[in-house]
Image (cartoon, rainbow, N blue to C red):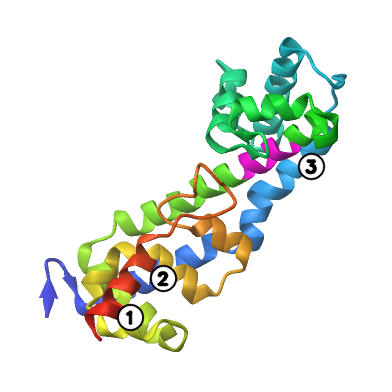
Amino acid sequence: MEIGSMTNTDIREEAERTIKTMTAGLDLGRVKGLFDEPIDNVARQFKHQAGCPVSHKTFHKVLADFVVLVYDRGLNACWKLSTDPLGEAIVLLEGNYQSHYGHGYIAAALDANDATQGGIDAVLYLLKEIIKRVERHKYLRSIFATNIETADWHVQCEIVRILVETYRPFLPKQIGQCEPWELVSQIPSMISLCLGVDSALQEILSYPRASAQNPDVADADAFSVLISTNTNRYR
């Protein structure tokens, strides 16, 4: 049987190559080498003279200097901050920062002026972790986008079929009762389960995104919803 210009064998081989490419890109050691290690290294080198409490002006300068260092030397992405490094820092804090003072930039500013919470050094530590999480997530989403979203529909269905065949013992029983096309949109979540990745990578593989209100807790992804739906469907 031939589908378009691809035979069933072609489709199978392309699906297998795509899975191999994605699993290589999702290797935890590779992810840490690209983001965690270089960011941690440059963050340890960052020096500032701000005390606690810290003035509004000094707080902004330290934030801007910090993100410039991290993106320039840690991620080799100085172009990203060529216009407004402070603006980038504020966007990162506003979208991801969480503390007992609340959420966002204001909470970070309050922490920076509270010695009991670690002052500005604690804010910079959390900002570093935010940058790592955001950049890892972009990278992993790019792997899925490049390898899944651009793939032929029949290849996508074959990817699902291979994952189910190979990892059936590790997948919920309801998966085997679904047609491959029903699970195409859930390939990222399936790969996450099949690889048995550790909790650190599991978090950044959460799909479609991590919670902005609490970046340490992933939103319930569509895969979980699908499992729940199919559980009820086949009762």
Tags 3 and 1 touching, CB below 8 Å: no
Answer whether residue 208 is visible to the viewer in this image. yes
Callout 3 secondary element? helix
Instruction: Give me the residue at 35% from left, 79% from top.
Output: 162
Name the main secondary structure of what is drawn in magenta: helix
Q: Is residue 162 above or below residue 34?
A: below
Residue type of the residue flagged with mark 2: Met
**Residue under pointer 1:** 175
Name the spot of residue 74 as percent of width and height, x first: 70, 37
Instruction: Give me the residue at 35% from left, 61% from top.
Output: 222
Residue type of the residue flagged with mark 1: Ile
Name the spot of residue 186 as percent of width and height, x first: 34, 65
Residue type of the residue flagged with mark 3: Asn
Tags 1 and 2 touching, CB below 8 Å: yes
Answer whether residue 159 is visible to the viewer in this image. no
Q: The magenta stretch spans which residues? A: 125-132
Earlier residue among tags 1 and 2: 1
**Residue under pointer 2:** 190
**Residue under pointer 3:** 41
Residue closest to the eye, 203 or 224: 224
Please count the marks in the image: 3
Q: Is residue 35 above or below residue 87?
A: below
Earlier residue among tags 3 and 2: 3
Front: mark 3 or 1: 1
Q: Is residue 206 magenta?
A: no
